[in-house]
Amino acid sequence: MALSKDSVYPLSPPIHGCLRVLLGLYLFTAIIYSYVWFSNNIDIYHLHDVDEPSYTTVIGSSAISWSFSYFTYLSYYGQGFYFFVTAVHTFFDAKTGTSWLHARLPTSLQILHSLCYSMVTCFPILVTLTFWCTMYVGPWYTLTFDALANISLHAMNILMALPEIILPTTEPLPWMHLHFLMIILSLYLGLAYRTRVTGGFWVYEWLDPELGKWKVVVHVVCYSVAIAVIFVFVRYTIWVKNSLLRRHTRIQLDRDEVAAEKLVGIFVVFEFNSWPRSCTFVT
């Protein structure tokens, strides 16, 4: 089970906790600001999909309720809550020297936290790659809000996932988590089609079977392969990081041991030279 621990390299737990608080505040500030903006403005988005012409979406205050149907926003919320929970964990560890997650939470919640770690390190990468590789339509946005919103939702999310991959001393993601990530993506399909029934719109155009049922199947397969590749990338990035850290720690311990032996040798020589020459050793 890969739990997000608080022994980080090279940050101390208090600094790491402050970093997590700042990232969580940024995430929720971006969400709240976008909601405030949509409540008073109408926005026009130009998007496209693979083998599909560009399409235009006009959104206003309805975007606030619609956001809970978009995988991007759901992933964003997940990151925000994760950072706040782990910040509390980090500060608790810094103050008491014990793991709040291990000491206070039942095993079931520890497992869920471990799965949440896999989600916040893998899903943002999927969101970012999907948007910029398959959905973005140039030229760059002329409206400042659109530019900032898309940078926050589709660029900053992956930049905020990287510290969680690099800094904490977590174990590599368990292979079992890949199955759960697939299940979560499958459940999201159900949410997307429910949104079509209740809200009357397609969250993503490729979900529309009238455009070709085979396209729906191809997209599902491609996203499944993508999340598997991302999972492997994150897992072995953590593995390489841990290997390098263990090697660095081992080298440092060897150096400390050699230094300690030299210090002991110097002390013994000093003591020997300071003994009176008339001393008689009794054996």
Image: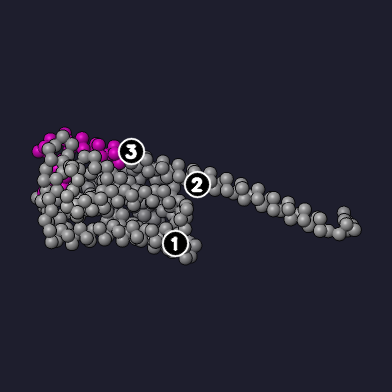
From mark 2 to mark 3, how far is it between C-alphas? Answer: 24 Å
Is 17 displayed left or right of 257 in the figure? left
Residue sitting at the far bottom: 95
The image quadrant of residue 237 is top left
Check disc 2: other Cα within 10 Å, few if <14, some if 14-19, many if 20+.
some
Residue drawn at 14 percent across, 42 percent down:
205
* First along the sequence among labels 3 and 1: 1
**Range shown magenta:** 201-229
What percent of the width, then of the height, locates residue 98? 48, 61
For residue 115, say whether it is visible.
no
Q: Position of residue 141 (x, y in %)?
A: 18, 48
Which residue is at a point 78% across and 57% down the rendered structure image?
A: 271
Residue 35: % across, % down: 19, 60
What is the three-letter code of the residue carrying label 2? Leu
Residue in the foreground of this view, choosing between 176 and 245:
245
Mark earlier in primary sequence (2, 3): 3
Name the secondary structure under disc 3: helix
> Which amino acid, by three-letter code, is at mark 3?
Val
Other-residue count near label 1 (Cα within 10 Å), few / some / many at <14 / 14–19 / ≥20: some
